[in-house]
Amino acid sequence: MSKGKVYIETFGCQMNIADTERATSRLQASGYGISGEAETADVILFNTCSVRARAEQKVFNRIGEIRKGAGASSAPIIGIMGCVAQLEGEALFGGGAGVRLVAGTRATDRLPDLIERALNGEEQVLDLGERLEDEQWDVPVVGRHSPYVAYIPIIEGCNKFCTYCIVPFSRGREQSRAASEIIDEIRRLSDVGYQEVQLIGQNVNSYRPKTEVGLEGFPGATPFSRLLRAAAATKMPRIKFTTSFPRDFHPDIVSAMDEHENLCDWIHLPVQTGSDRILRAMRRGYKVSDYLSRIDTIKNAGRRYALTSDIIIGFPDETDEDFEATLRLVEHCRFDAIYIFKYSERNGTPAARLANNVSDNEKANRFLALEQLQKGIQKKIYADYVGREVSVLVERRSAKSDLDMSGHTTCNKVVNFPGAENLQGNVVSVRVSEAKANSLYGKMI
Ligand code: 5AD
Ligand code: SF4
């Protein structure tokens, strides 16, 4: 007999998707049903993101929508988990949204009990506590977001405290998962046919487990490069990792990637700005020249690595000159893709004490100018793929055409091609015939 049906809606990054998977597995193990839709659920959980104000607002809009749809008769229990929960805590019970459960970023394993208390009539169930000492990070195969690609958290939290960022507050201090557990999980996923794992964390290359059990016999200048070599030694066909922090991006990571083809040819290395003055104000802990030397290592490596980055525009006091330095950096690095964010002031961060003094209008202009520059660069990079053969992990029907299937290359580019549904989960070769702005098109060979 099911204890009740839970529906979880996820916002934000891969870490939140991984937490939802973990919550799902813990709830199923405790006898709860998992519902694919809000309408039939007894409990609706929102797994939230607070990295920018807009992301946060989206959650509250969505709660309003769902409450309207539910009507008064079948009012489900509404709960908030994830980063907004951790930051806002008790305050979420007020405000008229009817929230009855608030579970912080380290409370995922306690969700079954928390929900039970809410179902038993407790009006305000709150847990902002720490992880349990003997906690297991493992997630069984059931309830994962994809049967082909698995996210594997290897480090949680962040110690970097970039001045604009809320993550160290919402996710807490860095905590690395035991290496043996990670390697075991990759092996298990490989045994049941997973084609790709993505090692995830706010800063994967800051990985530093308390003991290195499981990494014996694997060389490397840092625990992360040792972990990569140990992961490569499993039979997993594709291993990707994100996000890397520039200061901790040891050249040995690139050496490990050069040595092992199943360590995929993609590196996400957020630079945030091309101005030393702004980097200092952001307290990123590196200079433009440090970043560029990392890029040199990557560009001079044994094979071509796709390179992507994040950039914030409109940080307090960012001048035209600062922004032009960012344009120059982007021009120089020739990223395969960049994610541009308008600076968003987050309460409680050091940067929130500075005047948010770049106007919305100026932010919009800088956004467009940077986007325009990147478009031109990307066009050339993507055009270079035409005529080449790429390996594609087929993941789903294309959203744009019923005749096409869609997947990713090892370098994390989206590829669409005509094909049948039964190709899903296979790695196929595609000859690229056309380059679009953000994807490639081709024919299976
Ligand atoms: N405003 C804008 N962008 C931000 N990011 C993090 N915090 C903020 C903020 N306050 C961006 C950074 C980071 C990405 C995940 O989100 O670029 O790399
Ligand atoms: Fe935020 Fe900086 Fe940590 Fe990334 S490294 S999560 S930007 S504080």
Image (tube, rainbow, N blue to C red):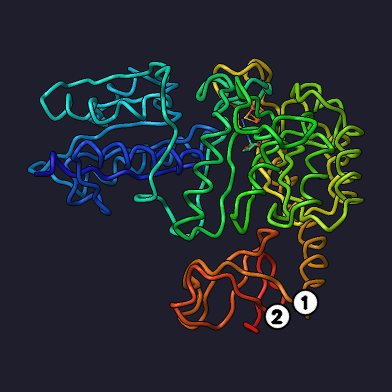
In terms of sequence position, does the residue under pointer 2 or pointer 1 come before the other?
1
Residue shown at 77% from the left, 77% from the top: 388
Q: Secondary structure at mark 2?
A: strand
Give the camera-side residue of 57 and 441. Answer: 441
Label 1 amino acid? Arg
Residue shown at 49% from the left, 39% from the top: 55
In the figure, 305 relative to 340: above or below? below
Q: Which mark is residue 431?
A: 2
Residue 67, position as x, y percentages in the image = 22, 42
Q: Are marks 2 and 1 in contact (CB under 8 Å)?
A: yes
* Crowding at mark 1 (Cα within 10 Å: few <14, some 14-19, many 20+): few
Residue 82, position as x, y percentages in the image = 42, 31
Q: Which residue is mark 1?
A: 388
Residue 135, position as x, y percentages in the image = 41, 24
Give the camera-side residue of 377 and 151. Answer: 151
Q: Find residue 421 and report its image quarter.
A: bottom left
Residue shown at 73% from the left, 76% from the top: 389
Residue at mark 1: C-beta within 8 A of ligand 1: no
In the figure, 14 relative to 438: above or below? above
